[in-house]
Image: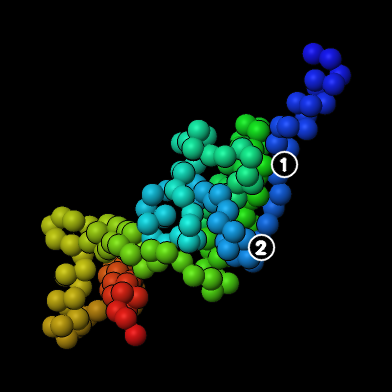
Amino acid sequence: MNRDQRRAKETSAPRVSLRRATVQELQAELASAPQLIDVRTGLEFRGGRVPGAVHQPLGSIDLASLDKRRPLWVICKSGARSARASQELVSQGFQVVDVQGGVTAWDSAGFPMEGKGGPGSLLMPALASLTLGLAPFVPEPHIWGKLRWVLGGAEGMATADGLDLLMHGAPWLWLAWSVVKMLRARTPG
């Protein structure tokens, strides 16, 4: 390949780069419909996402579906996974904009989110309730025995018993609070 052919190839090929951007820069860019991928897990994605984001989990990004001629914005929960994905995408020849702070910073800035408060947001409180909230499982979930003790007057209950009740009861309170939040988000007005 001669010098003129090399120059022509260099000028026609997209320039590979990595840039870091704030959520405010992403919000300003949304009007132009950027190429935006969210590399979080499916449950995280369904729990709330930046409008227009396409789900491409870290480790299974579909490179063929992405346009190398356009900047590719990458976001995750806090910035760690998007930084890893961004490095890999740059090595594959993409122009990448890594969104610092991720969806957490986006939500904290008060920007709109799609799917926020959906069923995916109940996963963690439900898992905590079904594990810690019901432990130990045999001979019965600990929380039931403690609640019966309190309803029976809590006679002889020590501080450690109260803390135990709090530890096993907190996941159920978290789950109830999450369900109420989800229902309020779905109620118009």
Residue 55 is situated, as x and y percent measured from the top left of the image, at 44, 48
Measuring 49% from the left and 70% from the top, which residue is drawn there?
Answer: 112
Q: Is residue 150 above or below residue 146?
A: below
Figure quadrant of residue 134 = bottom left
Figure quadrant of residue 115 = bottom left
Residue nearest the observer in this picture, 111 or 67: 67
Question: What quarter of the picture does the C terminus occupy?
Answer: bottom left
Measuring 28% from the left and 72% from the top, which residue is drawn there?
Answer: 179
- Residue 160 visible in image: no
Task: Report the amino acid beneath label 2.
Answer: Glu
Which color mode does the image show?
A: rainbow
Question: What quarter of the picture does the N terminus occupy?
Answer: top right
Q: Is residue 102 left or right of residue 57?
A: right
Mark nearer the N terminus (1 vs 2): 1
Q: Is residue 13 left or right of residue 162?
A: right
- Residue 150 visible in image: yes
Figure quadrant of residue 168 = bottom left
Task: Report the amino acid beneath label 1.
Answer: Ser
Please tell me whether mark 1 sits on a helix, a strand or a loop.
Answer: strand
How many circles with numbers are drawn on the protein? 2
Residue nearest the observer in this picture, 64 or 182: 64
User: For mark 2, what is the residue?
Assistant: 25
Residue 37 is situated, as x and y percent measured from the top left of the image, at 52, 49
* Picture disc at residue 161: none
User: For mark 1, what is the residue?
Assistant: 17
Measuring 52% from the left and 34% from the top, which residue is drawn there?
Answer: 63
Q: Is residue 30 left or right of residue 112?
A: right
Please tell me whether mark 2 sits on a helix, a strand or a loop.
Answer: helix
Residue 169 is situated, as x and y percent measured from the top left of the image, at 28, 71
Residue nearest the observer in this picture, 63 or 107: 63
Residue lying farthest right? Answer: 3
